[in-house]
Amino acid sequence: VLAAALGMAFFATRPAAGAAYTWTGNGDGTTWNSAANWSGSGFPSTASDTATIDSTSSNITIPSGRNMASITTGGTYSGTLTQGGTLTLASLTIGAGTLTLNGSAVTLSSTFFMSGGTFNMSSSAISFASNTWAYTAGIINPGTSTVTFTSGCNYPLITGSHTLYNVTMSGGGCSSHI
């Protein structure tokens, strides 16, 4: 009976799969893995979770090994979101604030949108397996990063004027280095 009660308590506090979380900063205001900093119950931690960071100046570090559906910064976000280690996302949207990569691998399987803010790519290796890299505004600091588009022979739609270094397009028997 005690084990069943403990099991129920454990499952009652786990975040639901595919949950949408919005940063509130109501906990310590900086810790990603603190449920008190997010709306809802829990924090973004599964491959189907989404995270939105808006209306804050918090400096937040994304824990290493995070695999999520999406991260979006927007509105009046004025802090810095820092990659703590490897990061896998379906979608990344930068609308405000700063996203700083730390040199670890980043995998994007769907879309990248940037309409504001700053994207510091450092020396990260970014693997992008889709057809949409959309840039309309903001600052991209490519550093010595490597961007590899792996969407096969269907080369991605890359919009906007910005600089990237070490770009490779490959997959499906097609390959070119730009």
Image: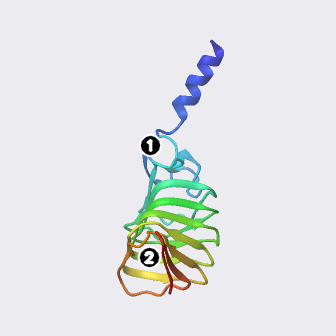
Residue farthest top in this picture? 1
Q: Residue at x 38, y 70 (%)?
A: 131
Q: Residues within 10 Å of mark 2 (few under 14, many from 20)?
A: many
- Which one is in front, 117 or 71? 71
Secondary structure of the residue carrying tag 1 is loop
Q: Residue at x 46, y 66 (%)?
A: 129
What color scheme is it?
rainbow
Image coords of residue 67 (percent x, y): 54, 54
Image coords of residue 42 (percent x, y): 52, 42
The amino acid beneath tag 1 is Gly
Q: Are marks 1 and 2 in contact (CB under 8 Å)?
A: no
The amino acid beneath tag 2 is Gly
Residue 89 in view of the camera? yes
- Dot label at residue 117: 2
Q: Indicate whether 90 appears above or below 44.
A: below
Image coords of residue 140 (percent x, y): 48, 82
Residue 134 in view of the camera? no
Q: Residues within 10 Å of mark 1 (few under 14, many from 20)?
A: some
**Residue with the mark numbered 1:** 40
Q: Indicate whether 131 appears above or below 32.
A: below
